């Protein structure tokens, strides 16, 4: 299985990658996301503005029930109704953006989920994903179990990283 994907959106022109794994299968042993990209979009992440111009790249059903803003970012569309994002320029200044995924971690995750593999970048992103686990510990330490009003910004940030913070 080797499917060619050609990307043409606002941030990438004629970017080509290949899907070498089945969708949602054969993840690295250290990478066990609790949410799929589709579930994340349906729950409400990134204020509803993420990936509106690149829907052709991903399965249509990911967007059927996605919470999308018609204009600017709207934190009311986020599951926890708070803004837990830093602007893209912040991530670029920190040198956390990989050239082939100019939108950041979630774009990498969507492509990884679909079956793209880039060994070194996959390992880097998985390491970043694992580092977010510290926020799970902070919520457990500081909140009563299932108190979804406690640390809402931290919970929203975890949703952005495919951790299901509704279950903590």
Image (cartoon, helix red, strand yellow):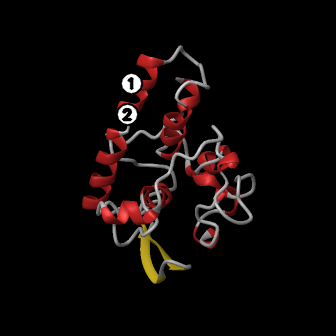
Q: In this view, does 167 lie to the left or right of 103?
A: right
| Crowding near the residue tagged with mark 1, few <14, some 14–19, many ≥20 C-alpha atoms within 10 Å | few
Judging from the image, what secondary structure is the residue with disc 2 in?
A: helix
Furthest residue in direction left, as rendered: 120
Q: Is residue 118 left or right of residue 47?
A: left
Instruction: Identify the residue shown where x is 71% and y is 60%.
Output: 69
Judging from the image, what secondary structure is the residue with disc 1 in?
A: helix
Residue 130: image quadrant is: top left
Where is mark 2, residue-wise? 133
Asked if residue 97 is positioned above or below residue 14 in the image, the reply reads above
List x then y, in percent, for residue 4: 47, 76
Q: What is the spatial separation of the Cα atoms under label 1 and label 2, in whole angstroms?
A: 7 Å
* Residue closest to the eye, 54 or 141: 141
List x then y, in percent, for residue 87: 47, 60
Where is mark 1, residue-wise? 137
List x then y, in percent, for residue 128: 32, 47
| Crowding near the residue tagged with mark 2, few <14, some 14–19, many ≥20 C-alpha atoms within 10 Å | few
Asked if residue 26 is positioned above or below residue 34 in the image, the reply reads below
Instruction: Identify the residue shown where x is 43% and y is 60%.
Output: 108
Asked if residue 116 is positioned above or below residue 9 in the image, the reply reads above
- The quarter of the rendered structure image containing the N terminus is bottom left
Instruction: Identify the residue shown where x is 42% and y is 74%.
Output: 17
As drawn, the label of residue 115 is none
List x then y, in percent, for residue 162: 49, 43
Asked if residue 51 is positioned above or below residue 79 in the image, the reply reads below
Furthest residue in direction bottom, as rendered: 14
Instruction: Identify the residue shown where x is 69% and y is 58%.
Output: 63
* Residue closest to the eye, 56 or 82: 82
* Residue closest to the eye, 68 or 149: 149
Q: Looking at the image, do the residues carrying marks 1 and 2 touch, with CB atoms under 8 Å apart?
A: yes
């Amino acid at each position: 299985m080797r499917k060619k994907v050609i990307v043409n959106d606002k941030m990438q022109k004629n970017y080509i990658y290949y899907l070498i794994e089945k969708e949602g299968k054969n993840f690295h042993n250290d990478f066990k996301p609790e949410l799929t990209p589709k579930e994340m979009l349906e729950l409400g992440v990134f204020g509803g503005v993420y990936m509106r111009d690149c829907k052709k790249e991903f399965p249509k059903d990911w967007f059927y029930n996605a919470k999308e803003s018609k204009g600017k970012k709207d934190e009311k569309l986020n599951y926890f109704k708070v803004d837990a994002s830093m602007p893209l320029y912040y991530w670029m200044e920190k040198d956390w953006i990989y050239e082939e995924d100019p939108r950041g971690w979630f774009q990498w995750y969507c492509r990884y989920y679909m079956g793209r593999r880039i060994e070194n970048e996959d390992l880097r992103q998985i390491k970043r994903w694992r580092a977010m686990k510290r926020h799970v510990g902070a919520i457990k330490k500081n909140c009563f179990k299932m108190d979804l009003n406690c640390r809402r910004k931290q919970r929203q940030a975890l949703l952005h990283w495919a951790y299901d913070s509704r279950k903590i």
